[in-house]
Image (cartoon, rainbow, N blue to C red):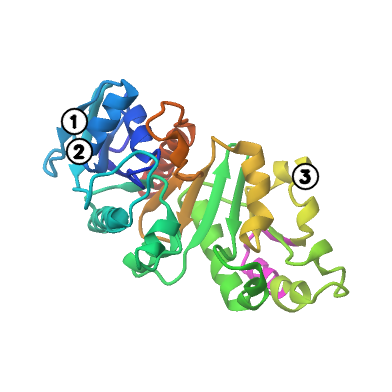
Amino acid sequence: MIASRLVITSGEPAGIGPDLVIQLAQHQWPMQLVVIADADLLQARAKALNLPLSIINYDANDAERITRPGELCVLDLALNAPTQPGVLDKLNADYVIRMLTRATQGCLSGEFAALVTGPVHKGIINEAGLVFSGHTELLAELSQTEQVVMMLATPGLRVALASTHLPLKDVPNATTAELLEKVMRITYGSLQHQFGIEKPRLFVAGLNPHAGEDGHMGREEIDVIQPVINKLRAHHMDISGCYPADTLFTPHKLKQADAFLAMYHDQGLPVLKHMGFGQAVNITLGLPFIRTSVDHGTALELAATGQADAGSFHYAIQVALEMLEARHVELSA
């Protein structure tokens, strides 16, 4: 195992993010986990959950420190205002952005080996006057990355998205050959270099019902998507499509493909979340560092109740560790 740090952002302070990192602290981990959060918030939430928590102040000079169950290494970041479980506060929207900014800076500098993000509430951040469409877009901006790809994964299925948080009416115009080529190259390369799959197989969905029905229900498949697939196949990439989305995730294709590319958010993710909700992870491909995340929201109604399930957080850490190991193996080869 690589001796380094993994940084965790605890997410919206009024939601279940703080609860989940406290649950994570009850387990032994093979590398140092550093949680960015308000230390007083974590102590108060641990008391509400009746869980033991001993906070270890983060020391940048001690990368080898492995915490024991019940301990949590915390990079203390003060809230702007006191928070109440389940109650959003615009005053703390900036706290969430500061948390993500600090984590990204640490990943870019090599201070942290990977980032795992807890759930945030986009609405309250935008309500506070801060432009925020999601983790994926913010991390790309902070790292000055031109193009990133959102992928969700659960055991047995990986789904990447050509577009992310767009209104459905904007998807066709956004589905350009230039975008698709970048997305397919990033996805294919990440399968090789971050997942350790030497010869990955990527299956691509069409945009329209029945993949356009030979142009009778739309020409995006003929004019845009298929030419990109053909171009990349000529460069020896094993990419297949366009497949009708309604038959893309059949058991036969699940066995054949290492990943699937959906054209828009709700084309691929309902299938994945049905298959693995609670044990799925959001991965940002194309960044200069590894980033994974939980697949759920802030669940305000569950904050401080003890009913929040940390399964997705566990899986997000597991996938980040596996990606680090794959990268280590590749660099050692």
Asked which secondary structure carries label 1, the reply is strand
Left or right of 244 on screen, residue 149: left
Tell me the distance, in whole angstroms, between the alpha carbons under discs 2 and 1. 7 Å
**Amino acid type at mark 2:** Ala
Q: Is residue 79 above or below residue 42?
A: below
Nearer to the camera, 84 or 188: 84
x, y percentage for residue 146? 42, 72
Q: Earlier in the sequence, mark 1 or mark 3?
A: 1
Nearer to the camera, 243 or 70: 70
Q: Residues within 10 Å of mark 2 (few under 14, many from 20)?
A: many
Q: Which quadrant of the structure image shows residue 60?
A: top left
Q: Which quadrant of the structure image shows residue 310?
A: top left
Q: Which quadrant of the structure image shows residue 314?
A: top left
Nearer to the camera, 96 or 7: 96
Asked which secondary structure carries label 3, the reply is loop
Residue at (24% x, 25% y) in the render = 53
Q: Earlier in the sequence, mark 2 or mark 3?
A: 2
Q: Which residues are magenta?
A: 227-241
To which residue does mark 1 refer? 55
Q: Earlier in the sequence, mark 2 or mark 1?
A: 2
x, y percentage for residue 69? 28, 21
To which residue does mark 3 refer? 250
x, y percentage for residue 18? 33, 37
**Amino acid type at mark 3:** Thr
Tell me the distance, in whole angstroms, between the alpha carbons under discs 1 and 3. 47 Å
The numbered dot on residue 39 is 2
Q: Residues within 10 Å of mark 1 (few under 14, many from 20)?
A: some
Indicate yes or no whether the magenta region holds residue 228: yes
Disc nearest the viewer among 2 and 3:
2
